[in-house]
Image (tube, rainbow, N blue to C red):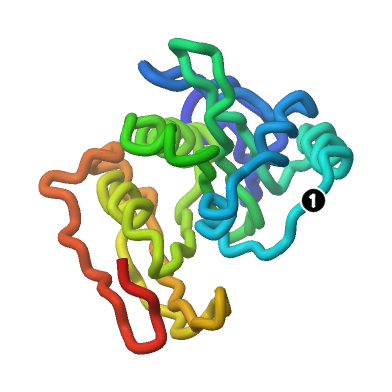
Amino acid sequence: MGRHDLVVGDAISLIEKPILVGERVLLRPVEAADAPGLATLDPETLKLTGSHRTHSLEILERWYATRAGHDDRLDLAIVDQGSGEWVGEVVLLDLDEHNRSCWFRILLAGPRFFGRGFGTEATRLILAYAFETVGLHRIELEVYDFNPRARRVYEKVGFVHEGTKRQALHWDGEWIDAHLMALLAPDWATHQGHPTPPPAPTMSSTPGGQGS
């Protein structure tokens, strides 16, 4: 498929579930067999998602098994090319087809996968697909103030800080800020996920937030 092959008229779709191959990772459609990795996340990793809820293995298996039929989201598993191990997931969701925008999130399954380039490459792979094949114009995300590692990755691939939602999350008795970041198709076309120089960090701990 070429650029904008998934565009029909003024609308776009995420119904196609591709396999995307990089040097370190392979992205493939999620499947029920991936659920145990999500069910056994440690508390610190769950904290980074900002979700207080946990789900049973059965519920997670059903969730993963039904992702293929959705045209408004794309859920891909991140797999280590070297070992074949499930590393996490990367997701495009809440598609606004007429404005050609969606939300982005990524999850790595614990600290042993941090700092190895998995998240950066997985993010670049799915962004390339989103902008160059699907034809999206804008991709946005939220990142919590206690996750500076993720913020650095997002800045590294070209996301720009657009604002702060003050005290958006209540966690362990503290109010945490959430930062809105976005990447536009014209910017992606310029740097392909390698801005030179990368955008200077623009976020720091603010009143009500939790510093790194």
Q: Is residue 181 above or below residue 183?
A: below
Q: Is residue 188 left or right of residue 176?
A: left
In this view, the residue in front, 26 or 150, is 150
Q: Is residue 59 left or right of residue 147?
A: right
Residue at the (32%, 36%) spot, across then down: 115
Q: Is residue 108 left or right of residue 158?
A: right
Image x and y of residue 194, in percent: 23, 39
In this view, the residue in front, 39 or 159, is 39
Residue 119: quadrant of the picture = top left
Image x and y of residue 20, in percent: 51, 22
Residue at the (58%, 25%) spot, across then down: 86
Image x and y of residue 135, in percent: 51, 42
Q: Is residue 55 above or below residue 28?
A: below
For the residue marked with disc 1, what is the amino acid?
His
Q: Is residue 58 above or below residue 155?
A: above
Residue at the (82%, 39%) spot, across then down: 57
Image x and y of residue 210, in percent: 38, 75
Does dot 1 land on a helix, a strand or a loop?
A: loop
Which corner quadrant holds the N terminus?
A: top right
Q: Is residue 8 visible?
A: no
Which corner quadrant holds the C terminus?
A: bottom left
Q: Residues within 10 Å of mark 1 (few under 14, many from 20)?
A: few
Q: How many marks?
A: 1
Which residue, given by chain and number where applicable, does mark 1 sit on?
55
